[in-house]
Structures are given as C-alpha cells and as structure tokens.
Image (cartoon, rainbow, N blue to C red):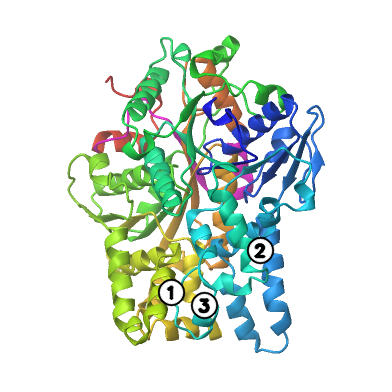
C-alpha cells in the first residue's frame, strides 16, 4: 500500500460516511503495530464505531487493544466535547442574562461547526507534543478536520471584535468566540497538518462517480490551504473474481470500472491504492488483518451463502410510501441524507411516479453534480424540473451582503466579512432562500425537494427570542420570509421529510443524528428509505450474498428503532436512468425482473 510507505508520525483518514475510513484506519494501526511501532488510534468521528470494530469499550481515555501489542485507542466524543465547550461559554452568563438570550446563544452553538471546532480543540494537544502522545511513533486519526475548520483557525485575532460588533452574518464563525486557548497553539497544530514530513492525509472514497467528485472537491479545498501531501484510497471495489455469471455483480463491476477510468483530473496525480470489497463484516482483528490486500487478492466469499434463502420478505416498498404521499393531493416532499446515499435518484423516482399518476409535480434540486437531467433522460407530462445552482445563489447572497453591510466597513472589516461569508452555513442559507420561493407552490401541487438544508441551518433561520432578533439585525431586516417556510416545514400535514440512508453502520448512525437535529428544529421525519440494498436482491454471487446478510442488522435498526415508517429499495442491476427505470425503482423490482440490458 502506497499510503503506508515510509509513514510519517501523523496519518489522517478523511472521507464521507460509509466509505470505510474507520476500517482502513484500524487496519493501518494494526499493521504498523505489527511492525513493532507504538501506535495510538484516535477517532473524532461523531458516528465512531472504533470500539465496535475492535470489540472493546474505548471512550474518551487511552485503552490498550488486546491481541495487538503496541496499539492503543482513544475516542474523542465530539458531542461531549461540544457540550463542554458550550458550557464553558454559556455557564458564566446563565442567571445573569435573560433566559431567551441564553437560549439564543445555545442555539448559535448547536451546529456542526461548533462540534467540529470543539473536537479540534480536544485533539490539538495531540498535534503539539503533549505528554499523552510522547511515547507513540504514530498517531492515526479517523476523520480529519475539514478545510473550513482549518481556515477558520487561521483567521487573525481581529475576528473576535468583528463578531462582537455585529458586523458578521448568520454563519459558522460564531462558535469561534468561545475559544480560550492561545492562538499560537492552534497555529502550531495547523502547521503540523501542513508539514508532509510529519503528516499524511489519506482521502478515502468508493468507486462511484458522485463520491469521487466529492473527494475531488475535498482535495482541492485542503490543497488550497496548504495541505497538499495527499493520498487517495478507493475502497470496496468488487473484484473480478467475484463476478462469475451473476448479472448484478457484472453490472456493479462494470459501473465501478467506468468510474475508475473517469477519475476526476485533479485526483489522477495523487499516489493511490485500491482495496477490494470484502465478503465479511470488518469487525474483529482477523477481519481487519485481511483488509489491506490488493483488489484481485480478495476472497470470493462463502459459496454456501449463494444458496441461502432470501433474507428479506414483505418489507415495505417505496411504492407504499408514494401511496401515502399521493393521498394528500399536494404538498412538500423533502429528501434528506448524507452525500452518496442516492437522494437525487430517489427524489426523481418519487416525482416521476407521482406525475405518472396524473398529479402535478415540481422536482427541484441543489445537487452540485447537476445530474438530475441525466437521471430523468427525458420529459414527462405533469412534471416540471428546476435546478438551484448553489454557487450562483451563494454568490448572489454574498454580493448583496457586501454591497449593503460591507459598504460601511474598512478594508480589514471587509476582508473578515468576506471570510465569514465563505462558511458552509452561508451556502445553506442562500440555497434555502431560493428553495423558499419554490416551497409556496406546494399549496397547489407537489414540490419534491432534493438536497435539503440541515437541521442546524433551519434552527438558525427560525430561532426564537433574542437570537432571532439578532439574526434579523445582522441581516439588515432582509429575508424574514424564512419564517413562513419554517412553519410549513414543521407542519406534518403540509410537509413530508424522507431520510435516505444505506444499510451500513455509519450511514445509519449519521441518519439518526440528522433525525435528532431535525427534531430539535421541530421537524418530525415522516419516513426513512434504505437505498441500494443487497439484502433485497436475489444474487448468485457468494460475496454479494454475504454482504446482504451483513445488512440485516442495520435494516432492523431502521425498522424497529428509528423510523415511524420505512421502505427498502434494492440495488438495481441497471442504473436507474429514465422514466421507466425510475418507476421500477418505486416498485422495487429485483434484478431478476429488470429488463435485459
């Protein structure tokens, strides 16, 4: 493996949920420890399952891993870190300020940026030579800080007064106001990240076009702030030896190989490795020791699995959810979920099915990949389609703020305001502002919305009391039309929120976190959709059958612990492109019933 050649002291694994970065980080730690090194594995993933992978309770303390001499692990709980961080800020003013003001401060510190910065605050010491890590040759991080967080930590000290003077906007910079450590320590940590002699960043992806485009954006963002020494690991590739005569396996293999051939140009120069899809769950030392092998060395799977009976029967189909949606005659349908779970395709399938029933539908998306038109591959009566360009909407929003508030600032103030407006929250607010114009149509037709804003952004837009007034003040009295859309989103009679996930541990954990976030915003998800399920497919490939068996626990988690109602959508042999295949997705036709290619 190239990423393991002459490894520096710090290795950071980063990537979207479900791509396998935790498994690869754990396998790397085992391999380095087996070579006689002293290794500390640190997880900062909110959905961390490092303890589950090793079969030991870890938590926020250093724990030696039995069976692997030289290996210890530590889980930094980002949620606990964020809560402690909030307590440090809010505690001194609780009881001194009015309760609505305190609640406003708490809401400002409720989002993903606070969690990310608090986690970085926790492991800064690990990058700056604390006594805790003095005896380790390698420290491996499962989940790296994003480029946005690092850029925030590079801001000059002037941002503090800038924010306190109310010159900023509704953004992610607010959480920085609570940092208590010296900025020199953060600078030392960022310098360590950017030093290729000390740090290596490993981008983890799957052999899927959308996932690789996302990784390309991450690569460029990190490279732009000086973190240029990056490696690319493409995980979970179906080996040719597992294809055999199975048509589903052949289709998956061909799609993945096409994605690898069309690797984004910015990723092609990176040193890279490819890791095979394994037939077994990556839990336990034996499984992890088998992971870092070449694609063609992967096992074929247990032949007895091919003869196993269908694991799933009588599970709800997507068509049952569409029946419930169609009964209302009109309304807003919002598809939410992490990147790579198939939101755009599922949104298109629901819109096509509703339109096919003669119902008027407006399908809209902010998908930066802009592949909705390709997915539909044509037009359909009763269906209109629009795409909100996040870059265009965000630039329009930024320009408006700079022309209004920025006009009264000096050069330093304008520079800080421009940085403020580069935060992820700015894009979410700008896109939601555009979405809110379309939402009004849901009183007379169906509006199916792909790539919806996060729960944290919705909280920012509709927080009550002093914080709400602060947002209004910062926005110069503009954009208060957000209130009506929020009321509509919180009304289950008008809006149905569908959470899309995969039948894998991390995506389900992340979807559960999203659901909790939405509930804090007063929005109750209507249903969950488990997409691309192998357990819902009849396949003759032993490897795929074993993977299907591994999905059952996650589907059970969704069905019995998370969702009020749910549907399982099978992984189709053919790409769900075009009206007929999208309708087949709604009917959940297994591979054996799909048309011949």
Q: CA distance from mark 3 to mark 1?
A: 8 Å
Q: Nearer the viewer, residue 49 or 588?
A: 49
Dot 1 corresponds to which residue?
416
Tell me the SS state at disc 3. loop
The label shown at residue 82 is 2
Q: Earlier in the sequence, mark 3 or mark 2?
A: 2
Q: Is residue 129 visible?
A: yes
Report the span colored magenta: 554-578
Dot 3 corresponds to which residue?
158
Q: On the image, which quarter does residue 312 sit in?
A: top right
Is 138 included in the stretch rendered in magenta?
Answer: no
Task: Give the position of the C terminus as an image quadrant.
Answer: top left
**Residue 211 screen position, x and y as percent:** 41, 39
Label 1 environment density (alpha carbons within 10 Å; few <14, some 14–19, many ≥20): many
**Residue 305, above or below 120:** above
Q: CA distance from mark 3 to mark 2?
A: 24 Å
Q: Is residue 373 left or right of residue 320?
A: left
Tell me the SS state at disc 2. helix
Q: CA distance from mark 2 to mark 1?
A: 25 Å
Q: Is residue 396 left or right of residue 469?
A: left
**Residue 320, above or below 432:** above
Q: On the image, which quarter does residue 377 sit in?
A: top left
Tell me the SS state at disc 1. helix
The label shown at residue 386 is none
The answer to whether the residues at label 3 and label 1 have Cβ atoms under 8 Å apart is yes
**Residue 343 screen position, x and y as percent:** 40, 46
**Residue 237 screen position, x and y as percent:** 47, 25
Depth-wise, is mark 3 or mark 2 nearer the camera? 3
Q: Earlier in the sequence, mark 2 or mark 1?
A: 2
């Amino acid at each position: 493996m190239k990423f393991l050649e002459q490894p520096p002291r710090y290795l950071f694994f980063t990537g979207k949920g479900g791509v396998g970065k935790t498994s690869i980080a754990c396998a790397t730690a085992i391999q380095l420890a087996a070579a006689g090194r002293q290794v500390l594995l640190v997880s900062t993933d909110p959905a961390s399952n490092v303890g589950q992978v090793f079969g030991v309770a870890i938590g926020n303390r250093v724990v030696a891993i039995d069976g692997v001499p030289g290996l210890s692990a530590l889980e930094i709980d980002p949620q606990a870190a964020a809560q402690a961080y909030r307590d440090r800020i809010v505690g001194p003013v609780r009881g001194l300020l009015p309760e609505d003001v305190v609640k406003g401060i708490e809401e400002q510190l409720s989002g993903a940026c606070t969690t990310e910065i608090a986690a970085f605050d926790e492991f800064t010491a690990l990058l700056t030579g604390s006594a805790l890590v003095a005896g380790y040759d390698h420290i491996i991080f499962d989940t790296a800080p994003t480029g946005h967080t690092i850029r925030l930590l590079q801001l000059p000290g002037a941002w503090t007064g800038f924010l306190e003077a109310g010159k900023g906007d509704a953004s992610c910079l607010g959480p920085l106001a609570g940092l208590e450590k010296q900025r020199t320590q953060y600078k030392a940590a960022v310098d360590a990240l950017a030093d290729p002699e000390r740090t290596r960043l490993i981008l983890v992806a799957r052999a899927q076009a959308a996932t690789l485009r996302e990784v390309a954006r991450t690569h460029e963002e990190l490279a732009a702030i000086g973190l240029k020494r990056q490696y690319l690991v493409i995980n979970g590739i179906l080996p040719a030896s597992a294809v055999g005569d199975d048509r589903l396996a052949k289709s998956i293999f061909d799609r993945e190989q096409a994605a690898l051939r069309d690797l984004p140009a910015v990723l092609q120069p990176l040193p890279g490795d490819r890791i095979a899809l394994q037939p077994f769950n990556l839990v336990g030392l034996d499984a992890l020791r088998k992971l870092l092998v070449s694609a063609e060395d992967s096992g074929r799977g247990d032949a007895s699995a091919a003869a196993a009976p269908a694991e799933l029967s009588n599970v709800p189909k997507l068509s049952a959810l569409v029946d419930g949606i169609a009964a209302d005659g009109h309304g807003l349908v919002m598809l939410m979920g992490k990147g790579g779970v198939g939101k755009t395709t599922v949104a298109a399938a629901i819109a096509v099915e509703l339109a096919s029933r003669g119902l008027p539908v407006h399908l809209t998306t902010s998908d930066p990949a802009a592949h909705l038109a390709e997915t539909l591959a044509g037009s359909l009566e009763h269906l209109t389609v629009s795409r909100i360009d996040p870059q265009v909407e965000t630039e329009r929003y930024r320009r408006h703020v700079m022309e209004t508030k920025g006009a009264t600032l000096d050069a330093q103030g304008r520079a800080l305001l421009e940085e403020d407006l580069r935060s992820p929250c700015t894009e979410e607010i700008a896109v939601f502002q555009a979405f809110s114009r379309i939402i009004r149509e849901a009183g007379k037709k169906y509006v199916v919305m792909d790539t919806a804003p996060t729960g944290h952004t919705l909280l920012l837009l509709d927080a009550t009391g002093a914080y709400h007034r602060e947002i209004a003040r910062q926005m110069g009295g503009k954009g208060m039309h957000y209130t009506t859309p929020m009321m509509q989103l919180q009304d289950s009679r008008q809006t149905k929120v569908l959470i899309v996930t995969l039948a894998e541990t991390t995506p389900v954990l992340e979807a559960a976190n999203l659901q909790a976030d939405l509930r804090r915003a007063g929005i109750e998800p209507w249903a969950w959709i488990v997409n691309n399920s192998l357990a819902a497919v009849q396949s003759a490939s032993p490897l795929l059958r074993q993977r299907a068996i591994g999905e059952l626990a996650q589907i059970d988690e969704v069905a019995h612990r998370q969702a009020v109602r749910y549907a399982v959508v099978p992984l189709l042999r053919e790409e769900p492109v075009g009206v007929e295949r999208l309708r087949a997705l709604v009917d959940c036709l297994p591979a054996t019933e799909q048309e011949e290619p």
